[in-house]
Image: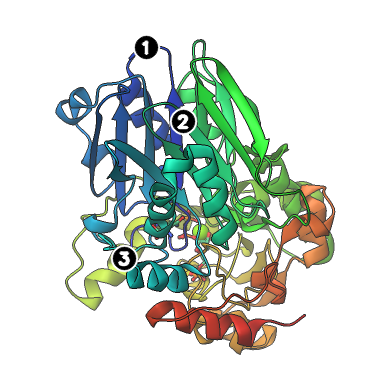
Amino acid sequence: MMDEMDRLHEECGVLGLYQPTDDHTAELLYYGLYALQHRGQESAGIAVTDGSRTRWHKEMGLVSEVFGEGELKKLTGNRGIGHVRYSTSGESDVENAQPLVVRYRGGSIAMAHNGNLVNAGLLRERLEDAGVVFQTSIDSEVIVNLIARYSNEGIHQAIRRTMDLVKGAYALVIMNEECLIGVRDPLGLRPLCLGKTETGYVLASESCAFDVMGAQLVRDIEPGEMVTITENGVTSEMYDTPGKRASCIFEYIYFARPDSVIDGVGVYQARRNAGRLLAAEWPAEADMVMAVPDSSIPVALGYAEASGIPYGEGLMKNRYIGRTFIQPTQAIRELAVKLKLSPMEQNIRGKRLVLIDDSIVRGTTSKRIVETLKQAGAKEVHVRVSSPPVAYSCFFGIDTPDRNQLIGAVKTIDQIRRVIGADSLGYLSPEGLVDSIGKPRNQFCLACFDGRYPTEVPVQTGGQAENRFQRLEEDHHE
Ligand SMILES: O=P(O)(O)OC[C@H]1O[C@H](OP(=O)(O)OP(=O)(O)O)[C@H](O)[C@@H]1O
Ligand SMILES: NC(=O)CC[C@H](N)C(=O)O
Ligand SMILES: [Mg+2]
């Protein structure tokens, strides 16, 4: 289970580094993972190889908790991969921590995965029927297992064959004794980009990892592309023919760090634009525009700019709350919420506020915050959200719960307004959201808002996968 103090909806972060020599490989990966920590706080891991031996360390917890000097020193080699996890398939357990490392025919393959497969259940069942024993309960193990299975055909052919079988969302970093490989799913659902250091190359979920590793963004990996990094540099091939693209729009809304650039678009700018468009769609009579920190700050700045209403700070976020925070009783839990976000009474009292958040999923955050602001003396709270109502489950990696837990799926906008206690409520339209990024709508997956899933409904069997499949069918409006 994730901790109340962590982010509520996440993605994993993946990272890879290839250098000619072991020049602080493990430390650089450690710094890079630090910069990707917002993508997952459940477990962290690094695997490094010197070409003959692969060593790894992974544990539950934040990057700073999992690695000390001792662990990093043991990870010697000139290339490695790393992962921070937010579980989407399989328990939040050390067994399921990544990178996954498998040994086969005297070699090894290490892999880290961001995303979620929609046909992992079926593939796993088939492999189990063929005698394969799984060590974890995650979809990612199906991928690495298939790659190892086909590896006698060479790593590239093994990946091509595996990608033919797996369906869904994946950004992968894969490493064997020879090379480092990055793979992005054919729809480009999950992000992955390439950076260059003075001597080597980096692959990362988000470009915000590059700066701290001394790397510069080179480009994004294309949907359906596989890039290979060796001592001779970078080579690329399309393992799938470019077709429909469906990049996850939630990366721009909430997942990504604002200093990242995804598919050529700066996340900060997209959020600021969303704020401006939100002000045009949903104006309000108010004295101050404020954000639910941190992801909505650029949105609130954009809203203030376009509306002429001054921006101010109404909530202080305590950045020092770790995962280990103990919450034994309900009363303490409620206090704990205030510990994460405390109202700044001096800025709020007697004011009509525009409260900006990037999304409403279950509605818990907005409800608590409106309550807190009113207790602190706010006269009116007008909630403005920089995305449409989340009304459909995501099957590609966002941890959005069963549809009946999504407040946007079960209630009208006016009902939501009443539940969260707001004086008015306005959501950015899908058109406004797409315009904020500045690319055509057909480049994105907006399934969590409109239920139009970008993939065929796959055949699924078994446990969780089966439930997911049924929901996918129910949700499929084409
Ligand atoms: O309607 P809900 O189910 O409460 O979810 C929506 C909230 O979750 C996210 O914030 P989160 O607290 O996860 O992280 P943040 O502090 O980085 O914004 C998002 O920014 C919303 O504030
Ligand atoms: N959030 C993610 O990208 C999760 C990756 C993988 N499905 C897991 O559960 O570990
Ligand atoms: Mg938030």
Relative image position of residue 391 (x, y in whole percent): 63, 78
Residue 46 relative to residue 344: left or right:
left
Residue drawn 17% across the image and 71% down it? 328
Q: Which three-letter amino acid code belongs to the residue tagged 3?
A: Ser
Q: Which residue matches tag 2?
A: 180
Relative image position of residue 437 (x, y in whole percent): 77, 49
Q: Is residue 411 above or below residue 175?
A: below
Q: What is the C-alpha distance between the residues marked 1 and 2?
A: 14 Å
Q: Which residue matches tag 1?
A: 21
Q: Is residue 302 above or below residue 431?
A: above
SS class, disc 3: loop
Relative image position of residue 255 (x, y in whole percent): 54, 52
Q: What is the C-alpha distance between the residues marked 3 and 1?
A: 35 Å
Residue drawn 48% across the image and 76% down it? 401
SS class, disc 2: strand
Q: Earlier in the sequence, mark 1 or mark 2?
A: 1
Query: Can you see residue 372?
Result: no
Residue drawn 59% across the image and 75% down it? 458
Residue 162 relative to residue 24: left or right:
right
Q: Could you say which disc has been placed on residue 137 in the image?
A: 3
Q: Which three-letter amino acid code belongs to the residue tagged 2?
A: Leu
Which quadrant of the figure shows ligand 2? bottom left
Quadrant that contains the C terminus: bottom right
Q: In the rendered image, which quarter is residue 164 located in?
A: bottom right
Q: Is residue 92 above or below residue 20?
A: below
Relative image position of residue 447 (x, y in whole percent): 68, 70
Disc 3 crowd, CA 10 A, few/some/many (<14, 14-19, 20+): some
Residue drawn 38% across the image and 66% down it? 127
Residue 388 relative to residue 294: left or right:
right
